[in-house]
Each structure stands twice: as structure tokens, then as C-alpha cells.
Amino acid sequence: MRRRHSGYAWHKSVDRIFTTPAFTHNTICRMLLSMATACDFEVHLVDVCQAFLNAELKEDIYMRPAPGVTQILGIPEDSWLRLKRNLYGLKQAPRNWSLTFIDWMLKDQGFCKASIDDCLFYKEFKHKGKDVFLLLLMYVDDNIIISNDRECVVEFKAAMHNKFKIVDKEDISTYLGVQVERSREKGNRWLKIHQEGYLNEVLAAMSIKKNDPLTYRTPLPTGIQLVKNEGEPYELELYRSAIGSLIYLATWTRLDIAYAVSALAAHMANPSLDHHVALRHLLYYLHG
């Protein structure tokens, strides 16, 4: 199958039908971290460098060169170049990488895919007479590895490095913008996930400064009724940007604001000044 693209031109159902890769859910991640903490398992993070470039193309793709490239290569102006590798910017690039990595995990490394999540893989085996398991949770190019044997984790990461160029971040400390703090002290094991850094960026972008925490003890004012705006939208882009940022917080570490964010998100199409006031109340609540 041959395709010719200019990068910006894409025809639905003609150029590519399947473009979406598998994505894990943050609930699975929280569950695995909780289990690892309770059982004192190893939890490591590995980042695959330039992951999309490792994927195989499933078809022939020709692209028009950027301006000036034809002169550098000494080829005619109307030339098209055939891609040899997956390329960032291709619609199918994330899916191609996902399929390539999953194929390597299942066929070369002997992992099995978990039934609860398409991005969770497991492997059980004997190592020096000990029953060992490996779990890998994949999110595009970020991979959480959990095991009851540190030596096996190191060996598996070496195998990954031989196949793909990776950055070994060892014991997990951040994951998708979520900060992870952990204690493995015997009798005092705990793990905390938070998004303090991310939250501070959101508050700074919305110009939220120090407040009296007693004034904002709830995510929304007590008894508030958010009414549909029948007039012109008020600062539409700012409102949408803030709600999008808060949704990420609400689904990961700040479950206490889930209802408030949902109520405010219902008015993203046409927010009013009252909606902005309620939004700022929520932001001050988070700041406090």
C-alpha cells in the first residue's frame, strides 16, 4: 500500500484507519503502586528514547521534502522521499510503536498480556530457585517495572537497552507529571503520589496568589447553582485551558475536586462571569 503525504494533508478512512494506540488507565497505575508498597516490591521507571523511530512502517509512505532539502540533496524540486522508519508527526506513529513494543514483549521476552488492561504485561519464572515475577505497565514510551527481585529487573532493563535506547530512571520518583515519594523502611512502608509541581504551574498561569484558607474550605461555594450562560462566552480559551488542567488533577491525585471540576466542565462551551468566579474559588481552594 502506498501513501503520499505533505504532512498536513490527511484523508480519513483513506490514508489510515487505525491510528490510536492502547492507553492504560491511571486507576491501574495507582493499584499497582499500592500493591508494590504493601509487599515491598521493586518499582522502577524506564523511558524509551525517541520511541516512535523504533517502530516499523506497515506501508510505503512518500513525503514531500521541506523547503530547501531538495537543494541540499541535489534532487529535483518535485521529488518525493520514501520513509524508511516511523516518523514523529505521522498519525499512525503512536500505534506502530505500541504494536512494535508489544510484539517484542510477547514474542521475544515471553510476557503475557493481562486481561484487565491492554498495557499491562506479566511474566512468572524461576530465578536461582526463587519464584520471580515481572510486571510492566506501558504508557507510550514510559514504562513502570515491578518485581519481587531487583536482579531480574536489572537484567530485563539490560535486555530493553539492547533492543531500544532507554533512559533508566531506576526507582520511580515521577511518572507522567505525578510525583512519587516512597519509604521502604520496615514497619513504616508508605507511598505518596502528588502533583504539587504541576498544580503550582496551573495556579501561576491563572495568577492565583496566597489566600485565607478559611475562606475556601470547599471546592465550590456552598449552595452554588451553576446556570447555563445564554449570552456571549466570557474568556472562553482561558476557561477551557484551566478546566483541562484541573481534569488531569482530579483524575490522578485530587479526587476531592472531581465533582466540582465536572460541574464546571459542563459549561466549557459557553462560560459566563459567574462560572469564572466559581472556577477561581476552586483554584483558591487548591492553593490553600
Image (tube, rainbow, N blue to C red):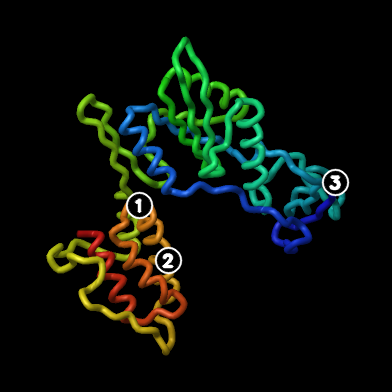
Q: Earlier in the sequence, mark 3 or mark 1?
A: 3
**Foreground tag (3 vs 2):** 2
Q: Where does the image place residue 38, in percent across and percent down from the top left?
A: 31, 33
Secondary-structure class at tag 2: helix
Q: Nearer the viewer, residue 193 or 173?
A: 193
Q: Amino acid at mark 2?
A: Ser
Above or below residue 61? Residue 84 is: above
- Residue found at the very far bottom of the displayed protein: 231
Q: Where does the image place residue 65, in percent across and percent down from the top left?
A: 76, 51
Q: CA distance from mark 3 to mark 1?
A: 47 Å
- Residue found at the very far top of the displayed protein: 128
Q: Amino acid at mark 3?
A: Ile
* Residue displayed at 84% across by 49% down: 1
Circle 1 sits on which residue?
198
Tell me which corner region of the image, top left, top right, bottom left or bottom right, holds residue 40. top left
Q: Is 124 displayed left or right of 238 in the figure?
A: right
Q: Earlier in the sequence, mark 3 or mark 2?
A: 3
Give the numbered dot on residue 75.
3
Secondary-structure class at tag 1: helix
Q: Amino acid at mark 1?
A: Tyr
* Residue displayed at 50% across by 47% down: 24
* Residue displayed at 47% across by 29% down: 168
Q: Residues within 10 Å of mark 3 (few under 14, many from 20)?
A: few
**Foreground tag (3 vs 1):** 1
Q: Nearer the viewer, residue 61 or 214?
A: 214
Give the numbered dot on residue 40.
none
Q: Earlier in the sequence, mark 2 or mark 1?
A: 1
Tell me which corner region of the image, top left, top right, bottom left or bottom right, holds residue 228. bottom left
